[in-house]
Image (cartoon, rainbow, N blue to C red):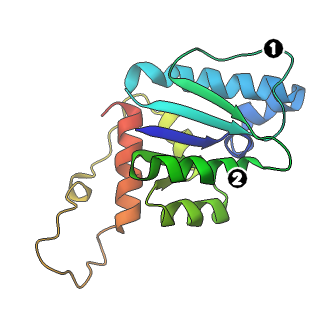
Amino acid sequence: MRWLIDGYNVIRREPDLRAEEGRSLEAGRRALIRLLSAALPRTADDFTVVFDGAPGSAAFGPAGRIEIVFSRPPEKADDVLRRLATRWREGGVVVTSDRAVQDATRRLHCVVVGSDDFLTALAMESAAEDDSDDDDDREAEPKRGNPRRLARDERAARRALRRLQGF
């Protein structure tokens, strides 16, 4: 599975990352990459982090499972995320709180996770939630809707977050 991350969107949702970005854009990017690097032992998934603009003075990030992509003007990070989502489709998890990007990538059948939920999952070491009811996506017969059951998109997002946590 490939996580497609809206870098600045995530940075600006977390106080510590935002404080690092206040020092410099590069410091904020490095802090996010460190946070993702800490999650690598818990998951076999790969990450692509998309930023607007040009890279800083030095290349950064661990080689391999974390890829860093910068948009090239006039293209924006949102455009790059949509393009990557087209490539990954069902194998991609898009992390952003930007509603337009969420809607566009959902139409491409990507799982969409909000930045806040993603940050919460990264922060959790091993706190498992009881989501046993959410694991069954089989639909043997048409459903009329269970008001207590989460929507299909929400169940997919929760499964993706559990993968990130190593469950």
Rendered image quadrant of residue 34: top right
Across and down, in percent, residue 139 comes to: 17, 70
Judge by depth and name the residue closer to the eye, 75 or 157: 75
Label at residue 78: 2
Quarter of the picture containing the C terminus is top left
- At label 1, counting other C-alpha atoms closer than 10 Å, the crowd grade (few under 14, some 14-19, many 20 or more) is few
Whether residue 15 sits left or right of residue 38 in the image: it is right
Q: What residue type is labelled 1?
A: Ala
**C-beta proximity under 8 Å, tags 2 and 1:** no
Residue 96 appears in the rendering? no
Residue 49 appears in the rendering? yes
Label at residue 58: 1
Q: Which residue is drawn at 87% across and 32% down?
A: 22
- At label 2, counting other C-alpha atoms closer than 10 Å, the crowd grade (few under 14, some 14-19, many 20 or more) is many
Across and down, in percent, residue 145 comes to: 27, 81
Image vertical order of residue 37 relative to residue 165, above or below: above
Image vertical order of residue 45 relative to residue 10, above or below: above
Q: What residue type is labelled 2?
A: Asp
Q: Residue at x 57, y 14 (%)?
A: 63
Quarter of the picture containing the N terminus is top left
Whether residue 123 sits left or right of residue 137 in the image: it is right
